[in-house]
Image (tube, rainbow, N blue to C red):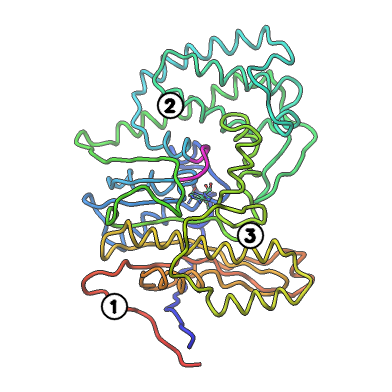
Amino acid sequence: MAVAYVMEERLEWRTWVTPRPLEAKPVHRWYVFPHSFTSELVKGLAQEWELGQGDSILDPFVGAGTTVLSAKEMGISATGYDLSPLAVLAAKVKTTDYQVEALREAWQVLKGTIVEYLRYQRRGDLSKPYAELVQRALPGGLLEAFDAVLNHICLLPASEEEKDFFRLAVLGLVPRYSRARATGGWLKWVDETEGVSTIPDALEQRVELMLEDVERATKMRPDSDHTACRVERADARCLPDPDGTFSAVITSPPYPNRHDYTRVFGVELMLAFLDWEGTRQLRYQSFHSHPEAHPVRPRIKGYSVPEELALLLRKIRQGRSDPRVLAMLDGYFRDVFLCLRELARVCRPGARIALVVGNAQYYGEPVPVDQLVAGIGEQADLLCERILVVRYRGNSAQQMGRYGRNPSRESVVVFRSPGPGSSKNKEVLQN
Ligand SMILES: C[S@@+](CC[C@H](N)C(=O)[O-])C[C@H]1O[C@@H](n2cnc3c(N)ncnc32)[C@H](O)[C@@H]1O
Protein backbone atom coordinates (compact mmCIF):
# COMPACT_ATOMS: atom_id res chain seq x y z
CA MET A 1 0.00 0.00 0.00
CA ALA A 2 1.48 3.39 -1.04
CA VAL A 3 0.44 6.67 0.53
CA ALA A 4 0.23 9.92 -1.46
CA TYR A 5 0.26 13.17 0.43
CA VAL A 6 -1.50 16.33 -0.65
CA MET A 7 1.06 18.25 -2.71
CA GLU A 8 0.59 21.88 -3.60
CA GLU A 9 2.89 24.10 -5.66
CA ARG A 10 3.74 27.45 -4.02
CA LEU A 11 6.38 28.58 -6.47
CA GLU A 12 5.73 32.24 -5.54
CA TRP A 13 7.59 31.34 -2.28
CA ARG A 14 10.71 30.21 -4.14
CA THR A 15 12.86 33.17 -3.10
CA TRP A 16 11.82 32.56 0.51
CA VAL A 17 13.95 29.42 0.76
CA THR A 18 17.17 31.19 -0.23
CA PRO A 19 19.24 33.39 2.08
CA ARG A 20 19.77 36.31 -0.33
CA PRO A 21 16.89 38.55 0.83
CA LEU A 22 18.28 38.40 4.41
CA GLU A 23 21.45 40.22 3.38
CA ALA A 24 19.56 43.52 3.18
CA LYS A 25 17.44 43.05 6.32
CA PRO A 26 18.34 44.83 9.56
CA VAL A 27 19.61 42.44 12.25
CA HIS A 28 19.12 39.36 10.02
CA ARG A 29 22.10 40.64 7.98
CA TRP A 30 24.46 40.40 10.95
CA TYR A 31 25.17 36.81 10.02
CA VAL A 32 23.64 34.81 7.18
CA PHE A 33 24.15 31.10 6.60
CA PRO A 34 24.34 29.86 3.00
CA HIS A 35 21.50 27.52 4.02
CA SER A 36 19.16 30.05 5.66
CA PHE A 37 15.54 30.61 4.64
CA THR A 38 13.93 34.05 4.91
CA SER A 39 11.81 35.89 7.45
CA GLU A 40 9.02 36.05 4.83
CA LEU A 41 8.68 32.28 5.01
CA VAL A 42 8.37 32.37 8.81
CA LYS A 43 5.92 35.28 8.70
CA GLY A 44 3.92 33.71 5.84
CA LEU A 45 3.46 30.46 7.77
CA ALA A 46 2.72 32.24 11.06
CA GLN A 47 0.02 34.28 9.30
CA GLU A 48 -1.48 31.22 7.63
CA TRP A 49 -1.56 29.42 10.98
CA GLU A 50 -2.93 32.54 12.75
CA LEU A 51 -0.19 32.51 15.37
CA GLY A 52 -0.23 35.35 17.88
CA GLN A 53 1.20 36.56 21.16
CA GLY A 54 0.11 33.58 23.26
CA ASP A 55 2.00 31.20 20.98
CA SER A 56 5.49 29.83 21.24
CA ILE A 57 7.57 28.81 18.22
CA LEU A 58 10.43 26.31 18.21
CA ASP A 59 13.31 25.94 15.75
CA PRO A 60 15.45 22.91 16.70
CA PHE A 61 17.96 23.65 13.86
CA VAL A 62 18.23 27.36 14.51
CA GLY A 63 21.16 28.10 12.16
CA ALA A 64 21.58 31.86 11.77
CA GLY A 65 18.38 32.41 13.78
CA THR A 66 15.86 33.40 11.08
CA THR A 67 12.89 31.73 12.77
CA VAL A 68 13.54 33.02 16.29
CA LEU A 69 14.28 36.57 15.13
CA SER A 70 11.23 36.66 12.83
CA ALA A 71 9.06 35.38 15.67
CA LYS A 72 10.44 38.11 17.94
CA GLU A 73 9.67 40.71 15.26
CA MET A 74 6.05 39.48 15.31
CA GLY A 75 5.89 39.59 19.12
CA ILE A 76 5.80 35.80 19.42
CA SER A 77 8.00 33.95 21.92
CA ALA A 78 10.54 31.58 20.41
CA THR A 79 13.14 28.96 21.29
CA GLY A 80 16.04 27.87 19.12
CA TYR A 81 18.53 25.03 19.41
CA ASP A 82 21.56 24.03 17.40
CA LEU A 83 24.56 21.76 17.83
CA SER A 84 26.93 24.37 16.41
CA PRO A 85 28.24 27.00 18.85
CA LEU A 86 28.57 29.41 15.91
CA ALA A 87 24.84 29.11 15.12
CA VAL A 88 23.96 29.50 18.80
CA LEU A 89 26.05 32.68 19.02
CA ALA A 90 24.50 34.19 15.84
CA ALA A 91 20.90 33.43 16.83
CA LYS A 92 21.43 34.53 20.45
CA VAL A 93 23.01 37.87 19.55
CA LYS A 94 20.30 38.63 16.98
CA THR A 95 17.54 38.11 19.55
CA THR A 96 19.13 39.93 22.50
CA ASP A 97 17.65 43.33 23.50
CA TYR A 98 20.74 45.57 23.68
CA GLN A 99 21.21 49.05 25.13
CA VAL A 100 22.88 50.91 22.32
CA GLU A 101 24.73 53.35 24.67
CA ALA A 102 26.45 50.51 26.52
CA LEU A 103 27.51 48.95 23.22
CA ARG A 104 28.87 52.28 21.95
CA GLU A 105 30.94 52.74 25.12
CA ALA A 106 32.38 49.23 24.85
CA TRP A 107 33.10 49.80 21.16
CA GLN A 108 35.14 52.93 21.88
CA VAL A 109 37.35 50.91 24.28
CA LEU A 110 37.71 48.04 21.83
CA LYS A 111 38.50 50.29 18.87
CA GLY A 112 41.32 52.00 20.78
CA THR A 113 42.93 48.72 21.81
CA ILE A 114 42.72 47.25 18.31
CA VAL A 115 44.42 50.22 16.67
CA GLU A 116 47.11 50.17 19.37
CA TYR A 117 47.66 46.42 18.95
CA LEU A 118 47.98 46.59 15.17
CA ARG A 119 50.69 49.24 15.52
CA TYR A 120 52.92 46.88 17.56
CA GLN A 121 51.73 43.41 16.53
CA ARG A 122 54.30 40.68 16.26
CA ARG A 123 54.09 37.63 14.02
CA GLY A 124 53.58 34.36 15.84
CA ASP A 125 52.15 36.14 18.87
CA LEU A 126 49.13 33.91 19.54
CA SER A 127 47.14 33.27 22.71
CA LYS A 128 46.66 29.55 21.95
CA PRO A 129 47.63 26.92 19.37
CA TYR A 130 45.36 26.98 16.31
CA ALA A 131 44.48 24.15 13.94
CA GLU A 132 46.43 24.02 10.70
CA LEU A 133 43.34 24.91 8.66
CA VAL A 134 43.00 28.21 10.52
CA GLN A 135 46.70 29.00 10.12
CA ARG A 136 46.55 28.34 6.37
CA ALA A 137 43.33 30.31 5.95
CA LEU A 138 44.58 33.39 7.78
CA PRO A 139 48.25 33.93 6.81
CA GLY A 140 50.41 37.07 6.84
CA GLY A 141 49.54 38.25 10.36
CA LEU A 142 45.76 37.86 9.85
CA LEU A 143 45.46 35.07 12.41
CA GLU A 144 47.45 37.10 14.96
CA ALA A 145 45.13 40.06 14.39
CA PHE A 146 41.89 38.03 14.72
CA ASP A 147 43.29 36.26 17.79
CA ALA A 148 44.18 39.60 19.39
CA VAL A 149 40.79 41.21 18.63
CA LEU A 150 38.93 38.22 20.11
CA ASN A 151 41.13 38.40 23.21
CA HIS A 152 40.56 42.12 23.60
CA ILE A 153 36.82 41.41 23.48
CA CYS A 154 37.22 38.97 26.42
CA LEU A 155 38.87 41.75 28.44
CA LEU A 156 36.21 44.41 27.74
CA PRO A 157 34.43 45.92 30.75
CA ALA A 158 31.10 44.65 29.37
CA SER A 159 28.50 41.93 29.95
CA GLU A 160 28.85 38.51 28.23
CA GLU A 161 25.93 39.43 25.91
CA GLU A 162 27.73 42.60 24.88
CA LYS A 163 30.98 40.71 24.29
CA ASP A 164 29.04 38.25 22.12
CA PHE A 165 27.76 41.16 20.02
CA PHE A 166 31.36 42.08 19.12
CA ARG A 167 32.39 38.45 18.66
CA LEU A 168 29.68 38.07 16.04
CA ALA A 169 30.84 41.26 14.31
CA VAL A 170 34.39 39.86 14.13
CA LEU A 171 33.27 36.44 12.90
CA GLY A 172 31.17 38.10 10.21
CA LEU A 173 34.42 39.55 8.83
CA VAL A 174 36.24 36.22 8.53
CA PRO A 175 34.96 35.29 5.02
CA ARG A 176 36.35 38.56 3.70
CA TYR A 177 39.88 37.70 4.93
CA SER A 178 39.96 33.92 4.86
CA ARG A 179 41.70 32.13 2.01
CA ALA A 180 39.31 29.23 2.55
CA ARG A 181 36.07 30.46 0.96
CA ALA A 182 32.72 28.79 1.44
CA THR A 183 31.10 28.35 -1.95
CA GLY A 184 27.76 26.62 -1.46
CA GLY A 185 28.56 23.57 0.59
CA TRP A 186 32.33 23.37 0.02
CA LEU A 187 35.51 25.24 0.84
CA LYS A 188 37.51 26.68 -2.01
CA TRP A 189 41.06 28.02 -1.56
CA VAL A 190 41.79 31.47 -2.98
CA ASP A 191 45.25 33.02 -3.41
CA GLU A 192 44.84 36.55 -2.19
CA THR A 193 42.60 38.31 0.30
CA GLU A 194 42.68 41.67 2.03
CA GLY A 195 45.57 42.47 4.35
CA VAL A 196 45.67 43.09 8.09
CA SER A 197 45.79 46.88 7.82
CA THR A 198 42.15 47.06 6.63
CA ILE A 199 40.75 45.16 9.63
CA PRO A 200 40.07 48.19 11.89
CA ASP A 201 38.05 50.02 9.21
CA ALA A 202 36.22 46.89 8.14
CA LEU A 203 35.31 46.11 11.75
CA GLU A 204 34.23 49.68 12.40
CA GLN A 205 31.90 49.62 9.38
CA ARG A 206 30.38 46.35 10.52
CA VAL A 207 29.93 47.42 14.13
CA GLU A 208 28.39 50.76 13.06
CA LEU A 209 25.90 48.96 10.83
CA MET A 210 24.97 46.62 13.68
CA LEU A 211 24.62 49.55 16.09
CA GLU A 212 22.28 51.31 13.63
CA ASP A 213 20.15 48.16 13.51
CA VAL A 214 20.06 47.99 17.32
CA GLU A 215 18.90 51.62 17.45
CA ARG A 216 16.18 50.99 14.87
CA ALA A 217 14.99 47.79 16.60
CA THR A 218 14.87 49.57 19.98
CA LYS A 219 12.68 52.35 18.54
CA MET A 220 10.31 49.83 16.97
CA ARG A 221 9.97 47.70 20.12
CA PRO A 222 6.80 48.47 22.09
CA ASP A 223 7.37 49.40 25.77
CA SER A 224 5.19 46.50 26.81
CA ASP A 225 7.21 43.94 24.87
CA HIS A 226 7.37 40.67 26.80
CA THR A 227 8.48 38.44 23.96
CA ALA A 228 10.76 35.76 25.36
CA CYS A 229 13.51 34.37 23.14
CA ARG A 230 15.83 31.59 24.18
CA VAL A 231 18.65 30.05 22.17
CA GLU A 232 20.79 27.19 23.45
CA ARG A 233 23.02 24.39 22.34
CA ALA A 234 21.06 21.12 22.07
CA ASP A 235 20.56 18.15 19.79
CA ALA A 236 17.31 18.16 17.79
CA ARG A 237 17.09 14.40 18.37
CA CYS A 238 16.91 14.85 22.11
CA LEU A 239 15.27 18.11 23.19
CA PRO A 240 15.41 19.45 26.75
CA ASP A 241 11.80 20.71 26.92
CA PRO A 242 8.89 19.09 28.72
CA ASP A 243 5.98 17.56 26.76
CA GLY A 244 3.49 19.93 25.12
CA THR A 245 5.59 23.11 25.31
CA PHE A 246 5.29 24.61 21.81
CA SER A 247 2.42 25.65 19.56
CA ALA A 248 4.42 25.72 16.32
CA VAL A 249 7.71 24.63 14.75
CA ILE A 250 9.34 26.26 11.72
CA THR A 251 12.66 24.70 10.87
CA SER A 252 15.01 23.26 8.32
CA PRO A 253 17.22 20.27 9.09
CA PRO A 254 20.41 19.94 7.04
CA TYR A 255 19.64 18.52 3.58
CA PRO A 256 21.12 15.09 2.75
CA ASN A 257 23.43 16.71 0.21
CA ARG A 258 26.85 15.85 1.75
CA HIS A 259 27.45 19.45 2.85
CA ASP A 260 29.27 19.42 6.15
CA TYR A 261 28.75 22.63 8.16
CA THR A 262 31.78 21.88 10.30
CA ARG A 263 33.92 22.14 7.16
CA VAL A 264 32.10 25.10 5.61
CA PHE A 265 32.47 27.00 8.91
CA GLY A 266 35.69 25.24 9.97
CA VAL A 267 37.75 28.46 10.17
CA GLU A 268 35.17 30.29 12.30
CA LEU A 269 34.59 27.26 14.57
CA MET A 270 38.29 26.68 15.24
CA LEU A 271 39.08 30.38 15.51
CA ALA A 272 36.53 31.19 18.20
CA PHE A 273 35.00 28.06 19.76
CA LEU A 274 36.53 24.62 19.35
CA ASP A 275 39.88 22.96 18.79
CA TRP A 276 40.44 20.48 15.99
CA GLU A 277 39.24 17.53 18.06
CA GLY A 278 36.11 19.39 19.25
CA THR A 279 35.28 20.25 15.64
CA ARG A 280 35.73 16.63 14.63
CA GLN A 281 33.39 15.50 17.40
CA LEU A 282 30.82 18.04 16.21
CA ARG A 283 31.22 16.69 12.65
CA TYR A 284 30.56 13.14 13.85
CA GLN A 285 27.61 14.04 16.04
CA SER A 286 25.75 16.28 13.57
CA PHE A 287 22.73 15.11 11.58
CA HIS A 288 23.67 12.30 9.19
CA SER A 289 23.47 14.60 6.16
CA HIS A 290 27.08 14.08 5.13
CA PRO A 291 29.19 10.90 4.89
CA GLU A 292 31.56 11.74 7.74
CA ALA A 293 28.83 11.90 10.38
CA HIS A 294 28.38 8.87 12.61
CA PRO A 295 26.28 10.19 15.44
CA VAL A 296 25.57 8.50 18.74
CA ARG A 297 21.78 8.41 18.70
CA PRO A 298 19.14 7.93 21.34
CA ARG A 299 17.40 4.55 21.12
CA ILE A 300 15.22 4.26 18.01
CA LYS A 301 11.88 2.66 18.80
CA GLY A 302 8.92 2.56 16.43
CA TYR A 303 10.78 3.25 13.18
CA SER A 304 10.77 1.02 10.16
CA VAL A 305 12.68 1.91 7.00
CA PRO A 306 10.02 3.12 4.51
CA GLU A 307 9.51 0.67 1.63
CA GLU A 308 10.40 3.31 -0.97
CA LEU A 309 13.66 4.08 0.83
CA ALA A 310 14.55 0.38 1.19
CA LEU A 311 14.00 -0.06 -2.56
CA LEU A 312 16.09 2.98 -3.36
CA LEU A 313 18.94 1.80 -1.12
CA ARG A 314 18.85 -1.61 -2.80
CA LYS A 315 19.03 -0.01 -6.25
CA ILE A 316 21.92 2.23 -5.26
CA ARG A 317 23.76 -0.69 -3.64
CA GLN A 318 23.62 -2.63 -6.91
CA GLY A 319 25.67 0.07 -8.68
CA ARG A 320 29.24 1.00 -7.79
CA SER A 321 28.17 3.14 -4.90
CA ASP A 322 30.12 4.58 -1.99
CA PRO A 323 29.00 2.61 1.11
CA ARG A 324 29.27 5.82 3.13
CA VAL A 325 26.57 7.41 0.97
CA LEU A 326 24.26 4.45 1.64
CA ALA A 327 24.95 4.69 5.38
CA MET A 328 24.32 8.44 5.16
CA LEU A 329 20.93 8.07 3.47
CA ASP A 330 19.82 5.36 5.89
CA GLY A 331 21.10 7.36 8.88
CA TYR A 332 19.59 10.62 7.63
CA PHE A 333 16.05 9.25 7.76
CA ARG A 334 16.67 7.67 11.18
CA ASP A 335 17.68 11.13 12.38
CA VAL A 336 14.56 12.61 10.78
CA PHE A 337 12.44 10.07 12.68
CA LEU A 338 14.14 10.85 16.02
CA CYS A 339 13.70 14.57 15.47
CA LEU A 340 10.03 14.27 14.45
CA ARG A 341 9.36 12.01 17.42
CA GLU A 342 10.79 14.71 19.68
CA LEU A 343 8.71 17.38 17.94
CA ALA A 344 5.57 15.26 18.43
CA ARG A 345 6.45 15.10 22.13
CA VAL A 346 7.28 18.78 22.77
CA CYS A 347 4.36 20.17 20.73
CA ARG A 348 0.90 20.87 22.05
CA PRO A 349 -2.03 18.99 20.48
CA GLY A 350 -3.01 20.74 17.25
CA ALA A 351 0.40 22.47 16.86
CA ARG A 352 1.65 23.03 13.32
CA ILE A 353 5.12 21.89 12.29
CA ALA A 354 6.87 23.00 9.07
CA LEU A 355 10.08 21.38 7.85
CA VAL A 356 11.87 22.89 4.87
CA VAL A 357 13.57 20.03 3.05
CA GLY A 358 15.39 19.50 -0.24
CA ASN A 359 15.22 16.41 -2.41
CA ALA A 360 18.46 14.84 -3.56
CA GLN A 361 19.78 12.57 -6.25
CA TYR A 362 22.42 9.84 -5.96
CA TYR A 363 23.75 7.74 -8.84
CA GLY A 364 20.88 8.95 -11.01
CA GLU A 365 18.26 7.87 -8.45
CA PRO A 366 16.03 10.68 -7.16
CA VAL A 367 15.55 10.70 -3.38
CA PRO A 368 12.08 12.15 -2.64
CA VAL A 369 13.07 13.54 0.76
CA ASP A 370 9.80 15.50 1.17
CA GLN A 371 7.57 12.43 0.71
CA LEU A 372 9.82 10.22 2.83
CA VAL A 373 9.82 12.84 5.62
CA ALA A 374 5.99 13.03 5.38
CA GLY A 375 5.72 9.25 5.82
CA ILE A 376 8.27 9.15 8.63
CA GLY A 377 6.33 11.91 10.42
CA GLU A 378 3.32 9.61 10.43
CA GLN A 379 5.48 6.90 12.05
CA ALA A 380 6.33 9.50 14.71
CA ASP A 381 2.59 10.10 15.33
CA LEU A 382 2.30 13.35 13.38
CA LEU A 383 -0.29 14.01 10.67
CA CYS A 384 1.05 15.30 7.36
CA GLU A 385 -1.31 18.08 6.24
CA ARG A 386 0.37 18.84 2.94
CA ILE A 387 3.64 19.25 1.11
CA LEU A 388 4.16 22.74 -0.30
CA VAL A 389 6.55 22.55 -3.26
CA VAL A 390 8.32 25.91 -3.33
CA ARG A 391 11.20 25.44 -5.75
CA TYR A 392 12.76 23.17 -8.35
CA ARG A 393 16.56 23.11 -8.36
CA GLY A 394 18.63 21.80 -11.26
CA ASN A 395 20.95 18.85 -10.63
CA SER A 396 24.71 19.44 -10.81
CA ALA A 397 26.37 19.73 -14.23
CA GLN A 398 28.21 16.47 -13.49
CA GLN A 399 24.98 14.58 -12.62
CA MET A 400 23.19 16.15 -15.59
CA GLY A 401 25.90 15.03 -18.03
CA ARG A 402 25.69 11.49 -16.73
CA TYR A 403 22.01 11.00 -15.88
CA GLY A 404 20.12 13.78 -17.73
CA ARG A 405 18.21 16.78 -16.44
CA ASN A 406 16.28 15.99 -13.30
CA PRO A 407 15.30 18.98 -11.17
CA SER A 408 14.89 18.33 -7.43
CA ARG A 409 12.01 19.69 -5.38
CA GLU A 410 12.56 21.93 -2.39
CA SER A 411 9.48 21.71 -0.21
CA VAL A 412 7.89 22.68 3.07
CA VAL A 413 6.39 19.60 4.71
CA VAL A 414 3.57 20.70 7.01
CA PHE A 415 2.47 18.47 9.88
CA ARG A 416 -0.10 18.84 12.61
CA SER A 417 0.41 17.32 15.98
CA PRO A 418 -2.67 15.18 16.61
CA GLY A 419 -5.25 16.75 18.83
CA PRO A 420 -8.99 17.00 19.17
CA GLY A 421 -10.63 17.41 15.75
CA SER A 422 -7.57 16.59 13.67
CA SER A 423 -8.06 14.19 10.82
CA LYS A 424 -5.59 12.55 8.49
CA ASN A 425 -5.52 14.67 5.36
CA LYS A 426 -4.16 12.14 2.96
CA GLU A 427 -5.33 9.76 0.32
CA VAL A 428 -4.47 6.11 0.63
CA LEU A 429 -3.79 4.57 -2.74
CA GLN A 430 -3.94 0.87 -3.34
CA ASN A 431 -0.99 -0.41 -5.36
C1 LIG B 1 19.80 24.30 7.22
S1 LIG B 1 20.65 24.89 8.64
C2 LIG B 1 19.39 25.87 9.41
C3 LIG B 1 19.27 27.22 8.78
C4 LIG B 1 18.25 28.10 9.46
N1 LIG B 1 16.90 27.69 9.12
C5 LIG B 1 18.46 29.56 9.06
O1 LIG B 1 17.54 30.18 8.55
O2 LIG B 1 19.59 30.06 9.23
C6 LIG B 1 20.73 23.46 9.65
C7 LIG B 1 21.37 23.65 11.01
O3 LIG B 1 21.26 22.39 11.70
C8 LIG B 1 22.35 22.30 12.60
N2 LIG B 1 22.42 20.89 13.06
C9 LIG B 1 22.99 19.82 12.47
N3 LIG B 1 22.78 18.72 13.21
C10 LIG B 1 22.04 19.09 14.29
C11 LIG B 1 21.46 18.38 15.38
N4 LIG B 1 21.60 17.08 15.53
N5 LIG B 1 20.75 19.11 16.31
C12 LIG B 1 20.60 20.44 16.18
N6 LIG B 1 21.12 21.14 15.15
C13 LIG B 1 21.82 20.48 14.21
C14 LIG B 1 23.52 22.84 11.82
O4 LIG B 1 24.53 23.26 12.70
C15 LIG B 1 22.86 24.00 11.05
O5 LIG B 1 23.02 25.20 11.74
Q: Amino acid at mark 2?
A: Leu
Which residue is label 2 attached to?
211
Ligand 1 neighbours mark 3 (CB distance < 8 Å): no
Which residue is label 3 attached to?
257
State which quadrant residue 105 falls in. Answer: top left
Q: Pick the residue in front: 89 or 310.
A: 310
User: Which residue, as the protein is rendered here, is positioned at the far left?
Assistant: 224
- Label 2 vs label 1, nearer the camera: 1
What element does badge 2 sit on?
Answer: helix
Q: CA distance from mark 2 to mark 1?
A: 48 Å
From the top left corner, tell me how far across and down residue 352 is, in percent: 33, 63
Q: Amino acid at mark 1?
A: Ser
Contact (Cβ within 8 Å) of mark 3 with mark 1 = no
Q: Residues within 10 Å of mark 2 (few under 14, many from 20)?
A: many
Q: Residues within 10 Å of mark 3 (few under 14, many from 20)?
A: some
Placement of 312 over or under 238, stated as above or below:
below
* Residue at the (42%, 72%) spot, across then down: 379
Q: Amino acid at mark 3?
A: Asn
Placement of 170 over or under 429, stated as above or below:
above
The segment highlighted magenta reads 82-87
From the top left corner, tell me how far across and down residue 333 is, in percent: 54, 65
Ligand 1 neighbours mark 1 (CB distance < 8 Å): no
From the top left corner, tell me how far across and down residue 57 is, in percent: 33, 52
Q: Is residue 50 left or right of residue 149?
A: left
Which residue is label 1 attached to?
423
State yes or no: residue 90 in magenta. no
Identify the mark nearer the N-term, 2 or 1: 2
Identify the mark nearer the N-term, 3 or 1: 3
